[in-house]
């Protein structure tokens, strides 16, 4: 029996109201708001933070493969899945792969993982997307940013795979070439009519036929969609009741989250699923993917770290198009001090920076970060023991720094005492300056600090714990 | 070895501090050095060695050799964060005390305003750990911790700014010569919370120089040499924010350097008549009172609030010059400028800001995130 063992989702805390975008261009607003990756987030961090929740307390050494899906991977050449694996502290002996360049990559990674799970392996599938619509287009309003993750395996599944179905079809509806900064969509109803509607209908119908089921048998369907309206169009005539059988697309609160969207929708479905439910997931792009699961009894006792719905509730509204433009480098600023970095140091300190290991002194027991050669407290000089640090703690002291140049001032520097020992000095994020106070509970979140040397410099930040 | 009474200051000079857009480093170095030569009544040919303190304005002894045409003598550049100046002085003192040289020059300078950067820019050489920290951020974290521990707020810090700006109005060479009100300080734009613009020292250009010599020779230059009673330097962790035991309500480097200087001088804080301390930020001065032993731990904010740090406050006056806050902080120059200022008081040449009957003065220079403390005790007998 293969299926979904665990899941997680990540919605960035910023929301950009579509009215803010529309006002900037004197254009009609589509209404609602879209989730927005902050300046320190990208497709990898979105997927990463969802993966951390999905993996939970599970031993990362058991994971045999990690698949990362995105159309906005942080590097054109350089795998993201390997970064996810290192941060999660898996064994080196595992299969990592990026599924890219198609909107369908999220569900394709999922179907591939399900096939591999049949060999008894535990896999993690994650997706993150922060797609760029051209300024002053409806796409700019339509897209939203999010991450999703699923742990796939053959034991202790929450939802057992019943069947899957894929259609591959050459089609140009939305695309982006190497030279294009923004996604291009063919104007008018062409893509919906001859692409989205057709492939979703074909895929869902094909899956149901293959499984000898009818639409009425489905408890809930997580179907990727550019909008709620498009989804209604695609399912017309298939026999689904939109209200009771189809997961809403969060178009009004998150927007179209690309490759991550079907995973986020599936997480939302699983959050409310009952044992015995038949649930369906479908993705669109160059054809379509779909999979059908039967929810098991295990769902009743499963606790998700952060539900999609709670993350939609906890938000910060960005009222400034200028800040969004700065986050996405639509407006660039030359900073007085050039950011510097080097892959050499990032490699040397990798175990401290990515999976966040500190040192524990075998003589005095003090846990410290970074890992010193000689104990910073007692001077013990025979080396510290590597110890994985907790990702929860409390704020010891801080400052809101308006001098450090950043797209989202101020930069809050935080001295954080971690649960179980260790003190880290990191930036605080997802928190308004006036809310910061000594003693506040914090959790660490994986973020991009800067792009010095033209590389993505990832490390942990702290944010208010829920 | 104890340095007490082995070395004397026989001359001190200082350039005008400020946004010296019209002066080069060379101009300021020459201005300070000639001032010191005149004060010591020496000819530069008598200088046998020199030490130069600068954080980032030069890399080598040539920083002095070329502007002053001091060729063919040993000149060493000293860098120890913001304590570079006083550490240059300390190294010069030890060289004289060792018997190697009779007369030497210690000069500190910094040229910050030729660059357009705000403050000292950001620190840290690691790609991500400690990324983006600035000088005020490191001290602001101490302020928030101090507030939390002792239940005070920004108005306590403002007292330091008000006092030092007042003193600065009486210092002709100070960067700022203007009074500030509590209202102005508390409501100034935030730089690093809780520190506002007027809690921070300015970004200043300047140079200061002192001539020191073997104590036995001092009276051949002037009748009233200032004796070096003790010089202490202490270096603690440069990443205190990652040290699990660091309380962040004081700087052990200051306390340890002061203890060393007091021991060498055979004195305690009670013997001190005036202090020039490193008030890079208002919070730093409050922590310094405590670390230097002028008051008990946790009482620093009261020391200034009750007026005891004033020139005529009935206790030990602190920063009669106006301090870094008002006199300015050209990094490498500051430690030497403090020796200059204390000497002016011991020579009764400090004009309107003169501390009456000053016989013993203490100067305190602090570098990095409170990690390099340097303390000098000087006396006129």
Image (tube, rainbow, N blue to C red):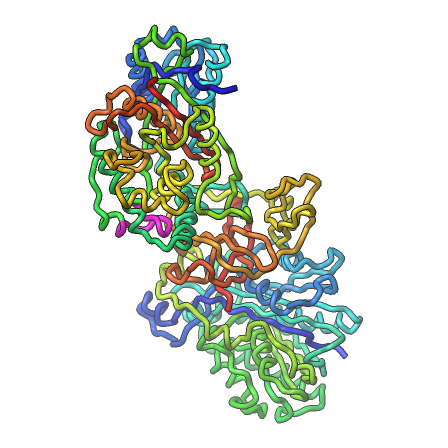
- Which of B238 and A258 lies nearest the eye of the viewer? B238
Vertical order, B157 against B12 (above or below): below
Residue at position x 58%, y 83% in the image: A272
Quadrant assignment, res B48: top left
Vertical order, A217 against A422 (above or below): below
Residue A170 appears in view: no
- Which of A30 and B132 lies nearest the eye of the viewer? B132
Q: Position of residue B49 (x, y in %)?
A: 45, 12
- Which of B168 and A230 lies nearest the eye of the viewer? B168
Residue B170 appears in view: yes
In the picture provided, is B319 more to the left or to the right than B133?
left
In the picture provided, is A135 more to the left or to the right than A98?
left
Quadrant assignment, res A149: bottom right
Residue at position x 53%, y 57% in the image: A447
Magenta run includes residue B338: no
- Which of B264 and A181 lies nearest the eye of the viewer? B264
Q: Position of residue B138 (x, y in %)?
A: 43, 45
Q: In the rendered structure, which segment of residues is drawn in magenta?
A: B186-197
Vertical order, B4 against A143 (above or below): above
Q: Quadrant of the N terminus of chain A?
A: bottom right
Q: Position of residue B305 (x, y in %)?
A: 28, 45
Q: Position of residue B258 (x, y in %)?
A: 44, 32
Quadrant assignment, res B25: top left
């Amino acid at each position: 029996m293969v299926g979904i063992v665990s899941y997680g989702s990540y919605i960035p805390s910023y929301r950009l109201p579509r009215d803010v975008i529309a006002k900037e261009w004197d254009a009609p607003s589509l209404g609602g708001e879209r989730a927005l990756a902050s300046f320190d987030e990208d497709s990898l961090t979105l997927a990463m933070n969802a993966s951390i929740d999905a993996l939970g307390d599970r031993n990362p050494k058991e994971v045999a493969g990690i698949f990362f899906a995105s159309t906005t991977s942080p590097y054109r050449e350089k795998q993201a899945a390997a970064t996810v694996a290192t941060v999660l502290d898996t064994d080196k002996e595992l299969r990592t792969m990026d599924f890219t360049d198609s909107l369908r990559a999220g569900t394709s990674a999922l179907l591939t993982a399900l096939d591999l799970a049949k060999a008894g392996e535990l896999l993690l599938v994650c997706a993150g997307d922060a797609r760029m619509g051209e300024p002053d287009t409806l796409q700019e309003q339509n897209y939203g940013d999010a991450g999703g993750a699923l742990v796939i395996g053959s034991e202790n599944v929450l939802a057992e795979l019943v069947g899957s179905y894929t259609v591959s079809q050459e089609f140009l509806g939305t695309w982006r070439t190497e030279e294009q900064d923004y996604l291009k969509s063919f104007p008018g109803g062409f893509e919906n009519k001859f692409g989205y509607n057709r492939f979703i209908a074909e895929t869902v119908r094909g899956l149901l036929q293959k499984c000898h089921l009818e639409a009425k048998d489905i408890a809930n369907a997580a179907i990727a969609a550019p909008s709620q309206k498009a989804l209604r169009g695609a399912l017309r005539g298939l026999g689904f009741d939109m209200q009771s059988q189809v997961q809403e697309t969060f178009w009004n609160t998150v927007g179209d989250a690309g490759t991550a969207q079907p995973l986020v929708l599936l997480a939302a479905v699983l959050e409310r699923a009952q044992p015995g439910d038949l649930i369906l997931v479908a993705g669109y792009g160059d054809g379509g993917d779909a999979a059908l699961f039967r929810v098991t009894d295990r769902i009743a006792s499963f606790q998700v770290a952060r539900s999609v719905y709670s993350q939609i509730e906890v938000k910060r509204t960005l009222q400034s198009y200028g800040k969004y433009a700065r986050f996405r480098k639509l407006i660039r600023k030359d900073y007085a001090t050039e950011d510097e970095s080097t892959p050499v140091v990032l490699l040397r300190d990798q175990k401290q920076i990515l999976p966040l290991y500190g040192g524990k002194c075998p003589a005095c027991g003090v846990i410290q970060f970074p890992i010193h050669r000689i104990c910073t407290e007692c001077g013990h000089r025979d080396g510290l023991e590597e110890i994985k640090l907790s990702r929860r703690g409390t704020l010891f002291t801080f400052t809101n720094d308006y001098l450090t140049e950043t797209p989202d001032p101020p930069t809050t520097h935080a001295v954080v005492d971690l649960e179980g020992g260790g003190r880290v000095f990191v930036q605080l994020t997802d928190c308004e300056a006036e809310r910061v106070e000594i003693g506040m509970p914090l959790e660490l979140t994986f973020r991009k600090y800067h792009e010095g040397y033209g590389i993505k410099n990832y490390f942990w930040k702290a944010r208010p714990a829920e | 070895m104890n340095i007490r009474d082995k070395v004397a200051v026989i001359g001190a000079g200082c350039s005008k501090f400020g946004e010296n857009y019209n002066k080069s480093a060379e101009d300021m170095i020459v201005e300070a050095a000639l001032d010191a030569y005149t004060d010591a009544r020496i000819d530069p040919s008598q200088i046998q060695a020199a030490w130069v303190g600068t954080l980032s304005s030069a890399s080598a002894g040539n920083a002095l050799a070329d502007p002053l045409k001091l060729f063919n003598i040993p000149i060493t550049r000293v860098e120890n964060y913001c304590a570079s100046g006083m550490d240059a002085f300390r190294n010069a003192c030890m060289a004289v005390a060792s018997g190697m040289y009779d007369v030497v020059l210690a000069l500190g300078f910094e040229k910050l305003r030729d660059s357009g950067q705000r403050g000292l820019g950001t620190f840290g050489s690691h790609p991500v750990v400690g990324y983006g920290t600035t000088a005020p951020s490191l001290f602001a974290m101490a302020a928030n911790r101090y507030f939390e521990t002792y239940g005070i707020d920004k108005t306590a810090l403002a007292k330091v700014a008000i006092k030092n700006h007042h003193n600065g109005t009486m210092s002709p060479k100070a960067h700022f010569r203007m009074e500030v009100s509590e209202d102005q300080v508390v409501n100034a734009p935030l730089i690093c919370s809780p520190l506002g613009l007027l809690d921070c020292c300015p970004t200043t250009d300047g140079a200061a120089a002192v001539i020191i010599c073997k104590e036995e020779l001092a009276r051949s230059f002037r009748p009233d040499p200032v004796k070096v009673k003790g010089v202490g330097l202490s270096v603690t962790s440069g990443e205190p924010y990652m040290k699990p035991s660091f309380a962040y309500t004081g700087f052990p480097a200051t306390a340890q350097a002061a203890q060393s200087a007091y021991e060498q001088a055979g004195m305690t804080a009670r013997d001190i008549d005036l202090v020039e301390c490193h008030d890079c930020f208002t919070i730093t001065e409050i922590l310094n009172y405590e670390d230097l032993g002028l008051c008990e731990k946790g009482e620093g904010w009261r020391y200034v609030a009750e007026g005891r740090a004033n020139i005529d406050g009935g206790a030990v006056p602190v920063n009669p010059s106006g301090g870094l806050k008002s006199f300015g902080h050209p990094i490498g120059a500051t430690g030497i400028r403090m020796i200059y200022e204390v000497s002016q008081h011991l020579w009764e040449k400090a004009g309107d800001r003169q501390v009456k009957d000053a016989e013993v003065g203490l100067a305190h220079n602090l570098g990095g995130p409170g990690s390099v403390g340097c303390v000098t005790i000087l006396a006129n007998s």
